[in-house]
Image (cartoon, rainbow, N blue to C red):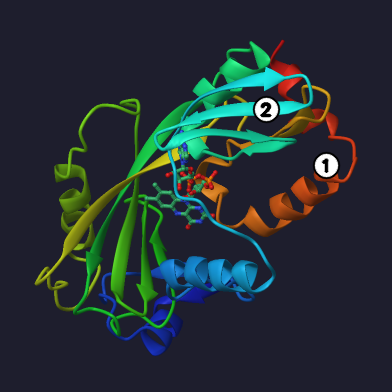
């Protein structure tokens, strides 16, 4: 990490306002330019390795003698082993299979995508005072942040996404354009101790991987490696086990 003077900031990111007097630069960081494209590539690679995807909503689940039975919106399925990785929606299926009420909540967050501001910043910039982040992606500049506790069912309050544009005002020499802007809300899956549940329960019939709060994308690859180990008989690590809550 390096401290940057106002002059250093002006040199690296000349579009930022001259009002900005200093900053912290974190070298060696990275971000995806197109998260959706990453998902599509993962699906393509998995299918090339023989994985079959079924797009169904799982409505209910119960244990059977040698596996798990699922009720879906398109009929029933049975499996020797299932993985619950439904993000903030994981509590209901976990309760159905384990009988445990996991204290999972959602920290709802918002972003505003500005398609005409793709080249405004050379790297992601966070405002410490205003507590939000501006990230250049291939489809535009994404302003993101905020935490809202409003559960899974309440409609999104997109005013919170537009508020991110107001927060950006004054941080640039010229205000960001909202032409063609699109607001979005997502459910961060969060647990009281900020750690995910990554576990193997019900005699190995059920694997669990959810609760990655603000860091689900960052921690996805490591979690996937652990899940593969658990599926092959590995033991869960104590801080991530479901029974830490009971
Ligand atoms: C505004 C915002 C900014 C963020 N920025 C970052 C960031 O910069 N870096 C980072 O690492 N993380 C970030 N996150 C957090 C990250 O998005 C989450 O941690 C991550 O998405 C959690 O991944 P997941 O796979 O557990 O859940 P999800 O991504 O929510 O995926 C769960 C999946 O399960 C499916 N599902 C749910 N219920 C069922 C059911 N009953 N049957 C079948 N399928 C079901 C859903 O359709 C969904 O596809 C951000 C979140 C928000 C809201």
Q: Secondary structure at mark 1?
A: helix
Q: Quadrant of the C terminus?
A: top right
Residue at coordinates 90% horizontally, 40% vertically from top-left?
Answer: 233
Q: Is residue 78 left or right of residue 120?
A: right
Label 1 within 8 A of ligand 1 by Cβ: no
Q: Quadrant of the N terminus?
A: bottom right
Q: Observer-nearest residue: 192 or 154?
A: 154
The residue that label 1 is drawn on is 230
Which quadrant would residue 126 be assigned to in this image? bottom left
Residue 40 horizontal/vertical position (percent): 48, 70
Residue at the extreme front:
75
Q: Is residue 196 visible?
A: no
Residue at coordinates 34% horizontally, 25% vertically from top-left?
Answer: 151
Residue at coordinates 28% horizontally, 81% vertically from top-left?
Answer: 120
Image vertical order of residue 178 relative to residue 154, above or below: below
Which quadrant would residue 111 be assigned to in this image? bottom left
* Residue 68, numbered circle: 2
Q: Observer-nearest residue: 88 or 108?
A: 88
Q: Quick one: label 1, few (<14), some, or many (20+) residues within 10 Å? A: many
Q: Is residue 155 visible?
A: yes
* Mark earlier in primary sequence (1, 2): 2
């Amino acid at each position: 990490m390096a401290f940057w003077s106002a002059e250093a900031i002006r040199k690296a990111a000349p579009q930022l306002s001259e009002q900005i007097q200093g900053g912290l630069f974190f070298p060696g960081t990275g971000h995806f330019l197109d998260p959706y494209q990453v998902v599509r590539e993962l699906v393509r690679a998995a299918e090339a390795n023989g994985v079959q995807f079924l797009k169904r909503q799982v409505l209910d689940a119960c244990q059977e003698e040698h596996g798990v039975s699922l009720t879906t919106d398109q009929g029933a399925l049975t499996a020797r082993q299932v993985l619950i990785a439904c993000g903030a929606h994981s509590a209901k299926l976990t309760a159905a299979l384990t009988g445990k009420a996991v204290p999972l909540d959602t920290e709802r967050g918002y972003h505003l995508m500005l398609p005409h501001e793709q080249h405004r910043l050379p790297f992601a910039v966070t405002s410490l005072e205003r507590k939000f982040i501006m990230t250049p992606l291939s489809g535009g500049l994404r302003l993101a942040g905020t935490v809202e506790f409003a559960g899974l069912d309440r409609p999104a309050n997109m005013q919170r996404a537009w508020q991110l544009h107001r927060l950006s005002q004054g941080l640039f020499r010229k205000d960001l354009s909202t032409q063609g802007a699109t607001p979005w809300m997502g459910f961060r899956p969060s647990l009281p101790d900020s750690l995910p549940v990554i576990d193997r329960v019900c005699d190995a019939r059920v694997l669990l991987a959810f609760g990655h709060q603000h860091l689900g994308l960052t921690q996805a690859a490591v979690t996937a490696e652990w899940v593969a180990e658990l599926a092959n008989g590995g033991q869960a690590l104590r801080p991530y086990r479901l029974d830490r809550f009971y």
